Image (cartoon, rainbow, N blue to C red):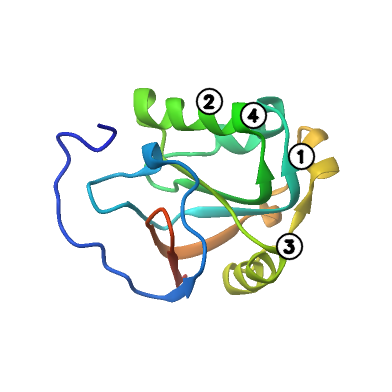
């Protein structure tokens, strides 16, 4: 189990709720779902089609500032690789797929623009491409974001 050996307890569902959850069970940090304090949030207006597109953002994922990636779509092979890295390496990461209205609202809430697939392929995203939140929690079906 991806969350084995981790403390169990109810998720604090604080902040604004969204109708999408994390995209794979292995993103869970405990038995109740995923939760992180002070994450960087990357909102992508398009599909993530290769791991190469996420190399620069993944390099920024730290215990102090985990990375949350919310995209219009994530290729199944990319999703599987991200989930395996989260599980095996304990990479502080959550990936989710959301519709257009939810991505727009999330970007507003965390103070970030939506980046395009072309932006990702460039291999460089400036710091202002990332939003910030006070907290993130999610299940497979829902997410909650506390403003920074």
Q: Is residue 103 left or right of residue 67?
A: right
Q: Residues within 10 Å of mark 4 (few under 14, many from 20)?
A: some
Q: Quadrant of the N terminus?
A: top left
How much space separates mark 3 and mark 4, taking CA atoms?
19 Å
Q: Residues within 10 Å of mark 2 (few under 14, many from 20)?
A: few
Q: Which residue is mark 4?
A: 55
Question: Do the numbered discs 2 and 3 sit on residues whose CB atoms are within 8 Å?
Answer: no
Q: Nearer the viewer, mark 1 or mark 2?
A: 2
Q: Nearer the viewer, mark 4 or mark 2?
A: 2
Which residue is located at x 31 percent, y 52 percent? 33
Q: Position of residue 103 (x, y in %)?
A: 66, 64
Mark 4 or 1, nearer chain start: 4
How much space separates mark 1 and mark 2, taking CA atoms?
17 Å
Q: Residues within 10 Å of mark 3 (few under 14, many from 20)?
A: some
Q: Nearer the viewer, residue 41 or 140?
A: 140
How much space separates mark 2 and mark 3, taking CA atoms?
26 Å
* Quadrant in the picture for residue 58: top right
Vertical comparison of 82 with 30: above or below: above
Which residue is located at x 58 percent, y 68 percent? 110
Mark 2 or 3, nearer chain start: 2
Which residue is located at x 51 percent, y 68 percent? 19
> Residue 146 has which mark?
none
How much space separates mark 4 and mark 2, taking CA atoms?
12 Å
Q: Give the SS element for disc 1.
A: helix
Mark 1 or 2, nearer chain start: 2
Q: Which residue is mark 2?
A: 81
Mark 4 or 2, nearer chain start: 4
> Residue 113 has which mark?
3
Q: Position of residue 144 (x, y in %)?
A: 42, 68
> Residue 120 has which mark?
1
Q: Give the SS element for disc 3.
A: loop
Q: Is residue 46 left or right of residue 7?
A: right
């Amino acid at each position: 189990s991806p969350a084995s050996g981790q403390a169990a307890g109810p998720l604090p569902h604080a902040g604004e709720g969204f109708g999408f959850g994390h995209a794979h069970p292995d993103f869970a940090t405990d038995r109740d779902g995923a939760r992180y304090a002070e994450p960087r949030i990357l909102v992508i207006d398009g599909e993530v089609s290769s791991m190469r597109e996420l190399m620069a953002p993944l390099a920024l994922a730290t215990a102090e500032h985990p990375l949350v990636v919310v995209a219009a779509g994530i290729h199944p092979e990319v999703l599987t690789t991200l989930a395996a890295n989260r599980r095996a390496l304990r990479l502080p990461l959550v990936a989710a797929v959301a519709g257009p209205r939810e991505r727009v609202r999330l970007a507003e809430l965390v103070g970030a623009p939506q980046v395009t697939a072309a932006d990702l392929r460039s291999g460089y995203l400036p710091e202002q491409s990332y939003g910030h939140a006070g907290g993130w929690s999610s299940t497979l079906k829902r997410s909650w974001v506390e403003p920074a």
